[in-house]
Image (spheres, rainbow, N blue to C red):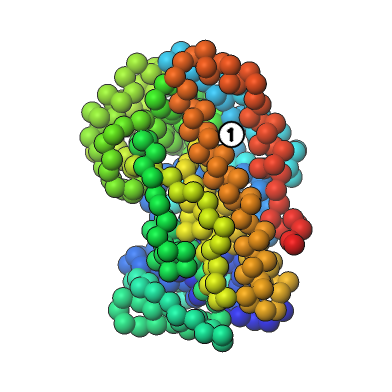
C-alpha cells in the first residue's frame, strides 16, 4: 500500500478518529482545527456495536468502557404517565447479537480519548488556529488554504469540518437546510442532586405531543444527560452553545412526567442550552478526485437515532480500508463513497422519520404505531449489525 500524506480539516470526533485509522495504516496525517485549543462541547453521545468494532482496532474499548455507561435497555414511555410502551434490550443482549457493547458517554470524554490516541501516533498531528478558507487540487495533489495566509499540501483532503463545512461547500455547493420546527434543550445533572435510585440505568425516551425527552447516564453513572425536544417557531442559532433561560425550559415541559420535572429542577439554571434543529436531505456525491467528506460534513443528521458520531467513525474506518484497497486515490475515494452513501442516507432518513414517531399527537396514535413496529428488531437487523471493519467493499 502506498503511503499518502493526508490532510484533515476539523479535529472533532470524526476527524480525530479518521486520523488514527489512517495513521494505523501507515499514512502521514495532519489535522487542521480552527479553534485555539482542542476541546469538545456538548453532552451525551452513544456508541453502538457498529462503531465499537472499529474503535477496538485502535485499542480504545477499555477507555470508552471506563468513561461510559452500558445501558440495560432502550425504553419508550408516555410523556406524562411514564408508562412503558415498548422496550428492547441493550447491554448483554446487544453484545451477544453484535459482538460488541453499547456504551453511552460524555462527548468531551470521548473527544479526549480520540485526541490522546491520535497524538500517540503522532504528537503534533493536530494544528490549531487554522481556519480553512478553501482548497485547490491538481492531478498530483491538493492544497488546503487558511485564513492566516498559510497553506498545506498533501495527496488528498478529508473534510471533517462539521455542519458548516467549508470543504463541503466547495465540493457540493450550497445545500438547503430546512428548520424542522424543533429545538433541542440540553442539560446535565450530577446524580447527587437527584433522588437515590432515581431512574434505572437505561435509555429512557418520553414521547409526547409536540416533543420528546431522552435521558441516560454518563461518566460511569455519575451524571444524568437530558435532551428535551420541543416544537417551536422561535428559531435560534444552529449551535450547541446557545444558552436560554431555565424558566423557558421549565415552561416547555410543564405537565410532563415527574422524573422530567425533577431533572429540570436540579439543573444549573445558568447552564441550560438550546439549539435549533435543521434538516438536510442526503446527497449522492461528496467527493472529487482529491477530496472527500466524512461525518456531519457528508451526511448531517437529526439526533433522533443516536448515530451521528457512529456514522463518522464508520466513515473513517471504511475510508482507511478503501485507501488500502485502491492505489489510485480517485478510485479509492469513489470506493469509499460508494460504500457509504446508501447506508448513511438510510440513517439520515430514519432519523427524520423518528421525529414523527416521537411526536405523535395522542396516546392512541403512539400505541397504534408501536403495536405495528418493533424498534429493537428493526435496528438490530440493519443498523447495529453493520461492521465497518469486515463489511465487503464493492
Tell me what residue is drawn at x 53 percent, y 35 percent: 353
Q: Is 87 displayed left or right of 92 in the figure?
A: left
| Residue 13 higher or lower than 8, as above or below | above
Tell me what residue is drawn at x 67 percent, y 59 percent: 339
In the rendered image, residue 147, in percent from the top left (x then y), is placed at 31, 76
Nearest the eye: 159 or 11: 159
In the rendered image, residue 201, in percent from the top left (x then y), is placed at 55, 29
- Residue wearing tag 1: 71
| Residue 88 higher or lower than 120, as above or below | above
In the rendered image, residue 242, in percent from the top left (x then y), is placed at 28, 45
- In which quadrant will I find the N terminus? bottom right
- State whether residue 229 appears in this view: yes
| Residue 170 higher or lower than 294, as above or below | below
In the rendered image, residue 33, in percent from the top left (x then y), is placed at 40, 68
Tell me what residue is drawn at x 60 percent, y 45 percent: 346
Q: Is 13 displayed left or right of 3 in the figure?
A: left
Nearest the eye: 77 or 163: 163
Amino acid at each position: 500500500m502506498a503511503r499518502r500524506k493526508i490532510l484533515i480539516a476539523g479535529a472533532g470526533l470524526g476527524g480525530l478518529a479518521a486520523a488514527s485509522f489512517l495513521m494505523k495504516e501507515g499514512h502521514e496525517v495532519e489535522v487542521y482545527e480552527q479553534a485555539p485549543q482542542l476541546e469538545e462541547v456538548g453532552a451525551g453521545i452513544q456508541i453502538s456495536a457498529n462503531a465499537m468494532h472499529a474503535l477496538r482496532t485502535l485499542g480504545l474499548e477499555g477507555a470508552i468502557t471506563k468513561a461510559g455507561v452500558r445501558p440495560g435497555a432502550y425504553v419508550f414511555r408516555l410523556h406524562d404517565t411514564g408508562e412503558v410502551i415498548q422496550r428492547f434490550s441493550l447491554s448483554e443482549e446487544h453484545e451477544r447479537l453484535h459482538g460488541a457493547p453499547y456504551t453511552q458517554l460524555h462527548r468531551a470524554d470521548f473527544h479526549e480519548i480520540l485526541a490522546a490516541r491520535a497524538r500517540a501516533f503522532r504528537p503534533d498531528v493536530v494544528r490549531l488556529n487554522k481556519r480553512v478558507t478553501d482548497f485547490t487540487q491538481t492531478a498530483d495533489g491538493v492544497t488546503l488554504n487558511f485564513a492566516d495566509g498559510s497553506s498545506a499540501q498533501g495527496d488528498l483532503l478529508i473534510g471533517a469540518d462539521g455542519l458548516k463545512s467549508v470543504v463541503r461547500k466547495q465540493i457540493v455547493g450550497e445545500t438547503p437546510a430546512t428548520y424542522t420546527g424543533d429545538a433541542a434543550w440540553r442539560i446535565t445533572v450530577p446524580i447527587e442532586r437527584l433522588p437515590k435510585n432515581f431512574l434505572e440505568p437505561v435509555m429512557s425516551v418520553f414521547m409526547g405531543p409536540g416533543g420528546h425527552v431522552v435521558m441516560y447516564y454518563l461518566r460511569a453513572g455519575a451524571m444524568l444527560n437530558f435532551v428535551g425536544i420541543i416544537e417551536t417557531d422561535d428559531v435560534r442559532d444552529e449551535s450547541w452553545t446557545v444558552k436560554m433561560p431555565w424558566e423557558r425550559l421549565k415552561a416547555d415541559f410543564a405537565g410532563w412526567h415527574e422524573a422530567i420535572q425533577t431533572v429540570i429542577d436540579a439543573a444549573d439554571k445558568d447552564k441550560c442550552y438550546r439549539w435549533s434543529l435543521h434538516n438536510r436531505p442526503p446527497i449522492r456525491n461528496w467527493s472529487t478526485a482529491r477530496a472527500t467528506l466524512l461525518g456531519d460534513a457528508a451526511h448531517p443528521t437529526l439526533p433522533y437515532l443516536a448515530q451521528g458520531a457512529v456514522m463518522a467513525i464508520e466513515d473513517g474506518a471504511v475510508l482507511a480500508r478503501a485507501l488500502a484497497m485502491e492505489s489510485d486515490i480517485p478510485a479509492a475515494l469513489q470506493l469509499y463513497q460508494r460504500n457509504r452513501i446508501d447506508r448513511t442516507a438510510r440513517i439520515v432518513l430514519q432519523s427524520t422519520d423518528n421525529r414523527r414517531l416521537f411526536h405523535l399527537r395522542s396516546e392512541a396514535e403512539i400505541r397504534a404505531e408501536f403495536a405495528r413496529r418493533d424498534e429493537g428488531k428493526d435496528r438490530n437487523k440493519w443498523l447495529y449489525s453493520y461492521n465497518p471493519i469486515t463489511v465487503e467493499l464493492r
